[in-house]
Image (cartoon, rainbow, N blue to C red):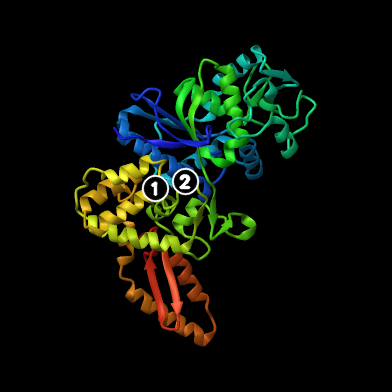
Amino acid sequence: MTTIKLHNSKTRKKEVFAPIDPENVRMYVCGPTVYDRAHIGNARPVIVFDTLFRLLRHVYGPDHVTYVRNFTDVDDKINARAAESGRSIGEITAETTQWYLDDMRAVGAMDPTEMPRATQYIPQMIQMIEKLIMDGFAYAKDGHVLFRVRSYKDYGALSGRSVDDMIAGARVEVAPYKEDPMDFVLWKPSTDDLPGWDSPWGRGRPGWHIECSAMSYELLGASFDIHGGGNDLMFPHHENEVAQSCCAHPEGGFANVWMHNEMLQVEGKKMSKSLGNFFTVRDLLDGHDGQPGVPGEVIRFVFLSTHYGKPMDWTAKKAAEAEATLRKWRKLTDGVEAGAPVATVVEALADDLNTAGAIAELHKLANAGDAAGLKGSAALLGLLSENLAGWEVSDAIDFSAQADAFADVRKKAMETKDFSEVDRLKALYVAAGVEVRMSKEGVELIAGPSFDATKLEGL
């Protein structure tokens, strides 16, 4: 059997992965808070842990791996979105949950085995909180329940910080209902206009951290194999999960292996709305700010080209190079039956999910003309699959007649200085997923991956 080695954030070293039960390998990954579209940084852990899911299924068998990724559907951001939009919370979370699933499937991610919603597990959260209070790890005051951070001696071990250092370097909420500034909320009261559930401490709703602890326990048990997420979650979210889970269920060890992916940048800069480089996965897929859409498979290839433990830089150049590579590979493997994944590709992935190394091996297979090996091996990375196919031939649509007609309209507009018809035509083509390129030589129309011919009917 293939030996898998993973970097464990808990021990800060790469270790041989030994599942608790090889017949039921269990992994939990923190999912989204569903109040809006997922930005491209949100897609990185999805693609990283989807690839690990595929590797585990390959090594242990598809029926012997359980992958849980949650949805946080009760949160103050959701409440605020409902208040500002006038829409119901249920309507917003149902819509944004489906958006998330559609967008992640578009970049080739398989659905996890289980996708629990926080609101489905409120009784289990209340039960866990009651046990923490009973055992002295939590206390209730003024409708709130808080976890006593100093009652858990190993608090800070995951992130490598001491409690005193955390207080000195963090913005902690000082509130009259807290015994200690570092104590965090397990339960908080809800006013009549907010979502709430009856509890021993009054009508209220759970804090964010307790959700994952309750859901992972119910679906994976007191001890499971792998817990994943972005490194921005290590503190306080993952640190708090460890504390409350180990105190509520001391018979278990919670997660044996912790894996954290690094963050994403855009063209060498931190992604932010102020820099104008913040965009969603859907923006990227459909095209944004005059830029054509990027196929989901191309997005996935770019993400996998950098090791998950290193910062990833999204650039237009990388996307263009990935597109060119995938076009060649799809042409080479067209009509070919996939072979078994080649050992060198499996070995690269088994070495702490070295996706960049695995892609280098795929290049070798392509250069050697091993189409069957390339197709079968690429599947382990979620590439060259049928469900992501089609984009590579979309730009073969002949728009020469339409381009000539557009050029005539543009020439007339330049004479009359009335560009209203040019603007109208361009807007129609862009809305249909067609890239419009205008130059001194004329007009070029190129169908993008989101091309919809029905939007051009009657033009």
Query: From this viewpoint, which residue is outermost toward the bottom?
Result: 415
Can you give x and y, in whole percent of width and height, for residue 442 in the image?
41, 81
User: Taking 118 as reference, is 459 above or below it?
Assistant: below
Tally the numbered discs.
Answer: 2
Residue 38 seen by the camera: no
Q: In which quarter of the image is residue 166?
A: top right
Query: On the picture, is 117 further left or further right than 83?
Result: left
Drawn side of residue 7 relative to residue 405, left or right = right
Mark 2 surroundings: few (<14), some (14-19) or many (≥20) residues within 10 A: many
Pick the front one: 66 or 11: 11
Tag 1, which secondary structure? helix
Q: Residue extending furthest top?
A: 134
Callout 1 touching callout 2 (CB < 8 Å): yes
> Can residue 118 be seen?
yes
Residue occupying image coordinates x 56% and y 45%: 36
Instruction: Give how far across and how far down residue 186 sits, in percent.
Output: 65, 25
Looking at the picture, does residue 217 appear above or below residue 238?
above
At 59% from the left and 19% from the top, the residue drawn is 247
- Please state which amino acid type lies under the numbered disc 2: Tyr
Label 2 sits on residue: 308
- The amino acid pointed to by label 1 is Thr
The image shows residue 252, relative to residue 399, as above or below, that is above
Q: Where is residue 291 in the image (x, y as percent from the top left)?
A: 48, 64
Determine which residue is flagged by label 1: 355
